Amino acid sequence: MLEIHKTDLPGVLVLKTRRFVDGRGYLVETFSERAFSGAGLRTGFVQENLSCSNRAGTIRGLHFQVPPAAQAKLVRVLRGAIFDVVVDLRQGSPTYGQWRGRILTAADGEQLFIPRGFAHGICTLEAQTEVSYKMDSFYAPECDAGLNWSDPDLKINWPIDAKAAILSERDVGLGFFRDFVTPFRFEKGFE
């Protein structure tokens, strides 16, 4: 059984799973098109990626794809724990430019659905953390974009000292929100 709960960012959802446990272990329903349809979501996931971060304090993000290849994501931790961050980039949204963070762990099984028009980033809280990402659009390098994880205007309260963060060269060089011209528009119906 999959429960879908709204957050205070329109369109961002928390999915709570139920574990069926017996002497062999457990079974979890991690995705249900029926549950998504019942919540008014029409996603046709076409790609799934897996990341493994060797050390705690690894930052990945803030990433997104711009139209015509914008992506909605369903994020789930398979091993370890993350601090997951989303930033609303949809012009006209009541939460435009705001961020929210949530701890996701393999143990609790919660997932985060992130609609198109959000930047997304993670900070690993444990070594050897594995994260699964389902996307509803294929990776398109020409549409790949991002914002700097430590953007002073966004003021994200990451659970790590900036000097200790482990980053890719790409993520270090990402631009800032104040210079970003958003191609995303808020769509009614996400309230």
Image (cartoon, rainbow, N blue to C red):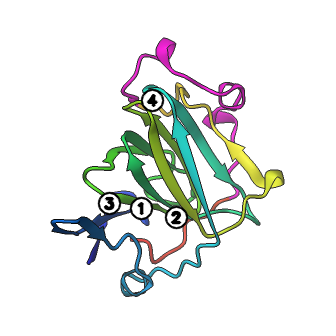
Q: Residue at x 49, y 34 (%)?
A: 154
Of the image marks 1 and 4, the number of the one nearer the N terminus: 1
Which of discs 4 and 2 lies nearer the camera? The answer is 2
| Residue 7 disc label | 3
Quarter of the image for residue 51 reads top right
**Which residue is the site of mark 2?**
115
Query: What is the CA distance from the residue labelled 1 to the residue labelled 4?
Result: 20 Å
**Circle 3 SS class:** loop
Report the side of 23 relative to 46 (left or right).
left
Assign the magenta stretch its main secondary structure.
Answer: loop
Of the image marks 1 and 3, the number of the one nearer the N terminus: 3
**Which residue is the site of mark 4?**
155
- On the image, the x and y values in percent for residue 185 come to 61, 64
**Which residue is the site of mark 1?**
12
Q: Could you classify mark 4 by the number of other residues whose Cα lies within 10 Å: few (under 14), some (14-19), or many (20 or more)?
A: few
Q: Could you classify mark 1 by the number of other residues whose Cα lies within 10 Å: few (under 14), some (14-19), or many (20 or more)?
A: many
- On the image, the x and y values in percent for residue 56 come to 42, 27
Asked whether the residues under the numbered discs 4 and 2 touch, taking CB atoms below 8 Å apart as contact, a structural biologist would say: no
Report the side of 27 relative to 158 (left or right).
left
Range of residues picked out in magenta: 157-183
Query: What is the CA distance from the residue labelled 3 to the residue labelled 2?
Result: 12 Å
Asked whether the residues under the numbered discs 2 and 1 touch, taking CB atoms below 8 Å apart as contact, a structural biologist would say: yes
Please name whichever residue, 61 or 33, is drawn nearer the observer in this view of the structure: 33
For the question of whether residue 99 can be seen, the reply is yes
Query: Amino acid type of disc 4?
Result: Lys
Quarter of the image for residue 72 reads bottom right
